[in-house]
Image: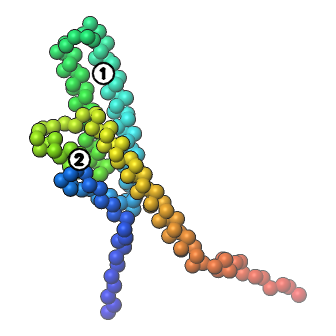
Amino acid sequence: MGKYNLDLQDDSLDEITLNKHGDKIFISGDDAKLFDRFSDGYKEIEKLADEADKELAEVKKKYPEAENENNFDRVVEISRVRVGFCEKAIAIIDNIFGEGTAKKSFREYYEAIPDFLPDEDKFVAFFETMTPIMEDIFKRKVERSEKASKARMAKYQPQDHKKPQRKARK
């Protein structure tokens, strides 16, 4: 009876520290869905922001006289639009990087204010910080893949792929 050990791990697991307390997430360029989750999430955040802008414009149209004064109903409607955007943004971040990523990223706020909801500026800052990290991870993945492909192809010599020679007829 033979014994085998299949270890397919390599150094493609990336550790990202999210706050000064050392909370981390782990991601890998070898995760086939990571790039799609990130790009889809980024696009979804942009779409949500556009929709929120339209909703806010509608609220402002609804209360034109309140533009320069504190109209309670106007403030409440604007707040609801912003809250809806932020709640959806948390779900998108957690979908991309794993459940709890948003809470870990803004841990100090949540510890001080348990029902804290990061605002739009926090999400923009999060994505501006994560984008170069993701670009680096994908760049390294492409480089590893190209290197592995070249190594696999180097095993095969051109003569391995020659068509069989036909013998000449006499």
Badge number at residue 56 = 1
Circle 1 or circle 2, nearest the eye = 2
Q: Position of residue 20 (x, y in %)?
A: 21, 51
Quadrant assignment, res 22: bottom left
Q: Amino acid at mark 1?
A: Leu
Q: Position of residue 21 (x, y in %)?
A: 18, 53
Task: Report crowding for label 1: few under 14, some 14 to 19, many 20 or more residues within 10 A (C-alpha).
Answer: some
| Image side of residue 86 versus residue 134, left or right | left
Residue visible at 19% across and 12% down?
A: 71
Give 163 or 80, whichever is nearer the viewer.
80
**x, y (%) of residue 120?**
28, 33
Above or below, 113 against 148 in this view is above
Q: CA distance from mark 1 to mark 2?
A: 27 Å
Q: Quadrant of residue 52?
A: top left
Rendering colour mode: rainbow
Q: Residue at x 26, y 43 (%)?
A: 91
Point out the residue furthest to the front here: 20
Amino acid residing under circle 2: Ser
Residue 17 visible (yes or no): yes
Residue at the spot of label 2: 105
Q: Nearer the viewer, residue 152 or 14?
A: 14
In the foreground, 164 or 62:
62
Residue 100 seen anywhere in this rendered image of the structure: no
- Counting other residues with Cα less than 10 Å from the Cα at mark 2, is it few (<14), some (14-19), or many (20 or more)? many
What is the quadrant of the N terminus in the image?
bottom left
Please give the name of the residue rendered at 22% of the width and 50% of the height, measured from the top-left corner: 19
State the residue lying farthest toward the right: 170
